[in-house]
Amino acid sequence: MKKTASVFLVALLGLAILVGIAVKASAADDESRLIVYTQKTMDQYFHVALQQGVEKAVLGAGYEFEVSNCNNDSTLQNNQMQNFIAKKPKGIIANSVDSDALNDVTKMATDAGIPVIMVDNPASTAVVDGTVAYDNYGCGYIAGQLIVKRLEAKYGSVKGRVVNVYGAMSSESWRLRKEGFDACMKEYPEIEYIQVPGEGEQTKSQEALTNVIAQYNKEIDAVHCPSDAPGLGCAEALMVAGMWRPVGDDKHIIFVTGDGEPDAVKGLMDGYYDGIVVEDAYAYGPMAVDLLVQYIFQGKIVPTGGTYTNENFYWKTAEFSNSERGPVLMVPPYVLDSSNVNDDRHWGVMALKAEGVIQ
């Protein structure tokens, strides 16, 4: 009897949750045609491209678009979010500067019945209608594997001195990339693993690697930087030290980054990068808008399992999953190297062609 009652209560609770979701969707389904985007920075090409993708997808779906850029200021981003809430938009797309700082204001938006889709760097605890995230742990681990393969090719076994110039730990994205890279390095005890903070900034990353180069008298085998923009600082440190040599040169330093920005892609094409673990900047906009238009605006529940398909992208399929923060649609990481760098579907290649850098 108790078991039957429990089952009934669970079923009743599930019905209540579904009704709550429907009511919430209905509350947000007003006359507004505005979808807003809160941007963390425009100082990195990746985020410029991400914003372009969001704007194109919003306008392409027939909605109005408005954006705010907080220039990596989490306090300003909170204020901008509050201003957006006051406008009662159809939906909010948000890319947080600090994974902890946006939780409260995000809850204010969802409590007001405004759907929120987080992209790239999600809030740490806020429960939202959907998150389009990237497998940052996988990105870090795959980067480590790329370096491992190059070390094995160089020495005949996996050994050497590897430097990881990691990003700011206040960012969940960079923290997970570090954890993934750390996990890979831990599997190979013959690797001497050196970790230095670059804080995700070009100048600080250059300084951090310059200090390592001096400390070890230039005797390093590989450098990893989790993002291309600060990775340019690492490249500059190697150039200044006379260590920036192309792949195949006896003195080449293995060089692997993440994201797939145009400058890094050009470096790969020119033969100086060994590989880039790509985060598809152009994918976030279409994926976020698809969640809003195909599911949330129609009062449907965003899936927590199964696959999402978009033939326009190199990776084609992505996975839905569930989390404590709500449904997640994961942008898959993949390797860009000399074998596939000329494929037009890579966002960095598309950007280079749009700029007229390559044909």
Image (spheres, helix red, strand yellow):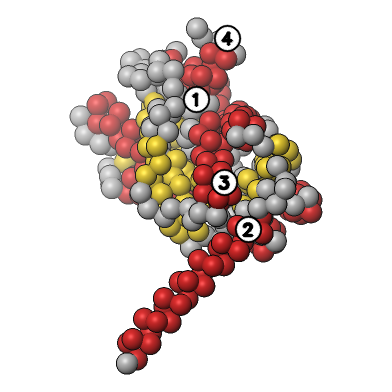
Can residue 276 be seen here?
A: no
Residue that label 3 marks: 292
Eyeballing the image, is 128 above or below 89?
below
Q: Nearer the viewer, mark 3 or mark 4?
A: 3
Mark 4 or 1 closer to N-term?
A: 1
- Distance in Å between CA atoms under marks 4 and 1: 14 Å
230 on left or right of 37: left
The amino acid on which the numbered mark 4 sits, given as a three-letter code, is Gly
Mark 3 or 4 closer to N-term?
A: 3
Residue that label 1 marks: 347
- Residue furthest bottom in the image: 1
- Distance in Å between CA atoms under marks 3 and 4: 34 Å
Percent x, y of residue 23: 60, 64
- Distance in Å between CA atoms under marks 2 and 4: 46 Å
Residue at image location 62% in from the left, 53% down from the top: 115
- Distance in Å between CA atoms under marks 1 and 2: 36 Å
Residue at image location 63% in from the left, 58% down from the top: 26
Label 4, secondary structure: give it: loop
Mark 1 or 2 closer to N-term?
A: 2
- Residue furthest top in the image: 359
Residue that label 2 marks: 26
Label 3, secondary structure: give it: helix
Crowd tier of the residue under label 4, counting other residues whose Cα lies within 10 Å: few below 14, some 14–19, many 20 or above? few
Q: Nearer the viewer, residue 266 or 224?
A: 266
Residue that label 4 marks: 356
Q: Which of marks 1 and 2 is in front?
A: 2
Q: Which of 38 and 147 is in front in this view?
A: 38
The amino acid on which the numbered mark 1 sits, given as a three-letter code, is Trp
Mark 2 or 4 closer to N-term?
A: 2
Residue at image location 28% in from the left, 47% down from the top: 187
